[in-house]
Image (cartoon, helix red, strand yellow):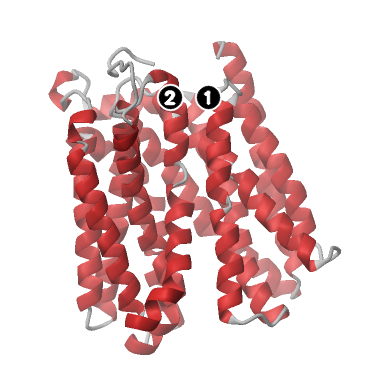
Amino acid sequence: MSSHIPIRTDTDWRAVLAAVLCGVAVAMNVGKVPIALPQLRAEYGLSLVAAGWVSSMINTLAMVSGALVGLLGDRLGPLRMCFTGLGMSILGGILGLLAGDEQALLISRFAEGAGVMAVAVSAPALLSSASAPIDRRFALSIWSTYMPTGVGLAMLLAPAVMPLGGWRGIWLLTLAVLLLATLAIHLSRPSYRIPLPEEFEAHPLAAARQALAQPAPWLLAIAMGSWTIQYYALVVWLPTFLKEQRGFGALTVAALSCLVVLANAPGNLVGGRLLQRNFHRGKLIALASLICALCGVGVFLDLLPDLLRYALCVTLSFVGGLIPAAVLSASASLARTPRQIGILQGLFMQIGNLGSFVSPPLIAVLVAASGLWRDALWITAGAALLGITVGLLLYRLELRAGH
């Protein structure tokens, strides 16, 4: 790692967790909409297309502008960028509460999406600066749990909150978590030892070119995209399968789906521990992709008992968590300067969201053509094979580099 990045002898875990809390808070904005969508459609008279935009606005924004937001974060500095993201998320939540029509609701989601991206590209640099070198990989693997944890919490808490205040109840809960995260990051400011932008001579565009000229970030980004294709195939399939083909009630469907989502978070932590023990990233990605491929075969082929298929869903989500842990924690190692972490995180986020964007419609086309969910296996198996290939290429690069 570059000497530009401050060397610490200890890790301020409170500051690390404050940065992670920012990610969890904005991820709740991602998870709150799918479960509230029926109420939103009823209140605002949303068409299926409009409802789709309300749900996917965050993914769409990240897919088209993740790296650009990372570049902007390089210019502003991660602390200011993180505060900006939290502010945009809070503003979006308030606008959503006050929205009187479909257009206002979409504007609120745009603000929330911008907030998610701003926090996603800046918080990793903050927690990296608050970590000692020996703990940095694990700290970044904790960060990689932010999305499944935030989405899972929103799904888990929504059934308890929404009977009290409808969809606005989960909006208010998310706003409360955002305010708590803002306070936590404010109190942790002294621990984020990042040089000011003017201390670097390189122009942000030059810094971006330097960061992205390496092959490893692109391979890691592709690995992230291959995982999100598999993950979103599972997330799309499971609730539909449980409801339409097994006749489970809404609460049971939500609980079983939530458990699968949350299983991804401890997988991230296990990945972080393995990386901390010098397990090669490429090998970790290839191995996880192989196990996910085998789990996918058991899940989508209707050959096994339902209980075993569900266990494979949980296993796929858990093992798949090794991949974002390997990818997102690599930014601190690949960055030449602290602010290049944001550029790399933006790239990973952009390609990862591309995977989540293309997976559902591709699977819908295949399944609609045949009427069989097993055809989704073509997509998931292809993505897993891509992950295995990319992981092996990364492993070769790591061996050449001697780490």
Question: Which sits in the foreground, 108 or 168?
Answer: 168
- The image quadrant that residue 81 belongs to is top left
Question: Which sits in the foreground, 364 or 89?
Answer: 89
Marks 2 and 1 in Cβ contact (< 8 Å) = yes
Residue tagged 1 = 276
Q: Is residue 126 above or below residue 109?
A: above
Residue tagged 2 = 135
- Seen at 19% across and 35% down, the residue is 189
Left-right relation of 148 to 133: right
- Seen at 61% across and 75% down, the residue is 252
Left-right relation of 218 to 22: right
Q: Position of residue 102 (x, y in %)?
A: 29, 80
Q: Position of residue 98 (x, y in %)?
A: 20, 77
Q: Tell me, yes or no, if residue 394 can be seen here.
A: yes
Q: Tell me, yes or no, if residue 342 can be seen here.
A: no
Q: Which mark is residue 264?
A: none
Determine the residue located farthest toward the left in the rendered image: 198
Q: Position of residue 193 (x, y in %)?
A: 22, 25
Q: Secondary structure at mark 1?
A: helix
Q: Is residue 92 above or below residue 333?
A: below
- Seen at 20% across and 69% down, the residue is 94
Tell me the kind of residue under disc 1.
Gln
Tell me how far mark 2 sits from mark 1, CA to CA: 7 Å
Q: Position of residue 328 (x, y in %)?
A: 46, 36
Q: Is residue 139 above or below residue 57?
A: above
Q: Secondary structure at mark 2?
A: helix
Mark 1 is surrounded, within 10 Å at the Cα level, by few (under 14), some (14 to 19) or many (20 or more) other residues, namely some
Question: Which sits in the foreground, 131 or 49?
Answer: 131
Question: Which sits in the foreground, 45 or 68?
Answer: 45
Left-right relation of 200 to 41: left
How many numbered callouts? 2
Mark 2 is surrounded, within 10 Å at the Cα level, by few (under 14), some (14 to 19) or many (20 or more) other residues, namely some
